[in-house]
Image: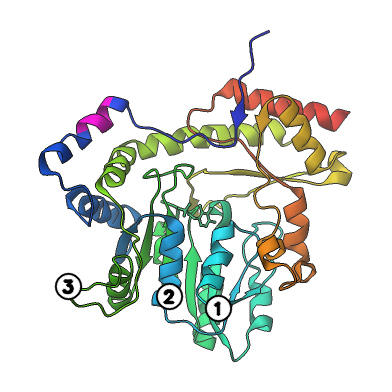
C-alpha cells in the first residue's frame, strides 16, 4: 500500500522560488523596503483593478484592516453581526468599544439571516457587519435595503471572499467597505496582509492615516493611529502570487467539485452551494454532518480522520459568542442555527496542491464511516 502523508486543511501556496527571489532583488539596490513604497503601490493598484472596486488600500494584515475600518466609520453603540466566524470579526467590534449584537445565520449559506436583522435594530444600532463566510455571499441587496432604511453603515468581513464576483460585480463594491485577508492560508496571500475596499474617499483618507500612526504629512497627526503598513517583501509576494492566482483557483475548483462528486450520495451531508451567478474562489470545503442521517457525529468523524492523519478543521467552532474572553456576556442559545451548525461543521482539506488521490482517500474514509 502506498504510504499516506499527513493532510492538513490548508497548505499555503508559494510561487516558484526563483521567481520570488528575482522579484525582490531590486530591494537590495533601493533599500526601500517598507512605508508605502514602489511595490506596495503597484500591488495596491493591481488589486484595486482585479477586485474592480472604487477605492482600495493595503494593510499589514486583515484583522488590523478590519479594526481600523470600523474605527474609520466612526460608529457608536451596537453593531449587528454573526458569531459564526473567525475570532477577528467579533474582536474587531469589541476592541472598538462597540457592542456586538449577534444575529443568527441562514442554515443553507451560513451568512447573516436577513429575516432576523430588523428585529435586532434599536436606537443604538450603528452598523451591520456581515461575513462572507467560506466565500458564501451575504444577501448584499437585502442588507443594503435594511441599512438604507435605518441609516446604518454596512461593513463586510470579506476575508474569505477575495476575487469573488456576483453577476460579474466585484464583491468588494457592496456596502460601505469590505475587508480582505491576505494571510498565508487564504486563497490569495502576501504571507500576512490585508486590504480594504471602500466607496467614500474620506474613509480612504482616514484609513491611510490610521494605518500610519495617524500621520497625514510632516508633523500633522490628526488621528490616533497604529502601524498597519504592508512592507515590500509582502507586496512582492502578493505580486508573484497574483500572477499564478487563476491557476490556483482552477486547481482548487477541481478538488472542490471532486469532493461533491464523491460525497453526494452519502446521506446526512450538506455542502456549500455556489450559485450560478457567482464566480467563486474555492478557498474552503465546509461539510455539515447531520448525526442522525449520517450515522455519526462531527466530532467522531473528525477523530477518525485524525487517526488516519487527515486534519480537517472545525471552522467555526465554538461560536465567537462562546469564547472564554466573552464569558457571561452573550447567550449563544439566541442564535440556535449558528450553534447547531458550529457543532456539525467540518472544513475538509482544500488547497491548490492537494491531489486527486488525496481527496479520494478522504472521501473513502467518510463513506466507510457512514456504513459502520
Ligand atoms: C483570516 C480571517 C480574518 C483575519 O485576517 P488576518 O489577515 O489573519 O488578520 C478575519 N476574518 C475572517 C473571517 C478570517 O477568516
Q: Nearer the viewer, residue 250 or 75?
A: 75
Q: What stretch is highlighted in magenta?
A: 18-22
Local crowd size for mark 3, using a 10 Å CA cut-off: few (<14), some (14–19), many (≥20): few
Residue 167 is at least partly visible in this image: no
Q: Earlier in the sequence, mark 2 or mark 3?
A: 2
Quadrant housing the C terminus: top right
Asked if the residues shown at circle 3 and circle 1 are in contact, with their CB atoms under 8 angstroms apart, the answer is: no
In the image: residue 262, left or right of residue 33: right
Q: Is residue 306 above or below residue 121?
A: above
Q: Earlier in the sequence, mark 3 or mark 1?
A: 1
Residue that numbered label 2 is attached to: 71
Q: Which of marks 1 and 2 is nearer the N terminus?
A: 2
- Estimate the x, y position of residue 229 in percent, counting from the top left: 31, 58
In the image: residue 35, left or right of residue 116: left
Q: Nearer the viewer, residue 42 or 262?
A: 42
Residue that numbered label 1 is attached to: 98
Residue that numbered label 3 is attached to: 217
Amino acid at each position: 500500500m502506498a504510504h499516506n502523508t499527513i493532510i492538513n486543511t490548508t497548505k499555503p501556496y508559494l510561487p516558484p522560488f526563483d521567481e520570488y527571489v528575482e522579484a525582490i532583488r531590486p530591494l537590495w539596490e533601493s533599500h526601500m523596503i517598507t512605508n508605502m513604497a514602489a511595490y506596495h503601490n503597484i500591488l495596491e493598484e493591481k488589486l484595486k483593478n482585479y477586485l474592480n472596486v472604487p477605492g482600495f488600500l493595503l494593510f499589514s494584515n486583515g484583522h488590523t484592516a478590519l479594526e481600523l475600518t470600523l474605527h474609520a466609520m466612526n460608529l457608536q453603540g451596537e453593531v449587528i453581526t454573526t458569531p459564526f466566524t473567525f475570532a477577528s470579526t467579533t474582536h474587531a467590534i469589541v476592541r472598538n468599544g462597540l457592542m456586538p449584537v449577534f444575529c443568527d445565520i441562514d442554515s443553507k449559506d451560513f451568512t447573516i439571516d436577513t429575516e432576523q436583522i430588523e428585529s435586532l435594530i434599536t436606537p443604538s444600532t450603528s452598523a451591520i457587519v456581515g461575513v462572507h463566510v467560506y466565500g458564501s455571499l451575504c444577501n448584499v441587496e437585502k442588507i443594503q435595503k435594511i441599512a438604507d432604511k435605518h441609516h446604518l453603515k454596512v461593513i463586510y468581513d470579506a476575508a474569505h471572499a477575495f476575487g469573488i464576483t456576483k453577476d460579474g460585480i466585484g464583491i468588494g463594491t457592496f456596502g460601505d467597505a469590505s475587508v480582505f485577508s491576505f494571510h498565508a492560508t487564504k486563497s490569495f496571500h502576501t504571507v500576512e496582509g490585508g486590504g480594504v475596499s471602500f466607496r467614500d474617499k474620506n474613509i480612504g483618507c482616514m484609513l491611510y492615516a490610521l494605518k500610519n500612526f495617524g500621520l497625514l504629512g510632516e508633523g500633522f497627526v490628526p488621528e490616533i493611529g497604529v502601524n498597519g503598513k504592508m512592507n515590500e517583501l509582502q507586496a512582492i509576494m502578493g505580486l508573484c502570487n497574483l500572477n499564478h492566482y487563476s491557476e490556483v483557483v482552477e486547481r482548487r475548483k477541481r478538488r472542490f467539485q471532486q469532493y461533491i462528486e464523491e460525497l453526494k450520495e452519502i446521506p446526512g451531508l450538506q455542502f456549500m452551494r455556489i450559485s450560478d451567478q457567482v464566480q467563486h474562489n474555492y478557498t474552503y470545503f465546509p461539510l455539515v454532518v447531520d448525526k442522525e442521517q449520517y450515522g455519526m457525529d462531527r466530532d467522531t468523524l473528525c477523530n477518525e480522520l485524525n487517526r488516519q492523519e487527515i486534519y480537517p478543521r472545525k471552522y467555526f467552532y465554538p461560536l465567537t459568542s462562546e469564547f472564554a474572553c466573552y464569558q457571561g456576556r452573550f447567550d449563544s442559545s439566541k442564535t440556535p442555527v449558528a450553534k447547531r451548525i458550529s457543532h456539525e461543521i467540518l472544513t475538509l482539506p482544500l488547497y491548490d496542491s492537494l491531489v486527486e488521490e488525496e481527496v479520494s482517500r478522504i472521501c473513502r474514509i467518510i463513506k466507510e464511516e457512514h456504513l459502520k
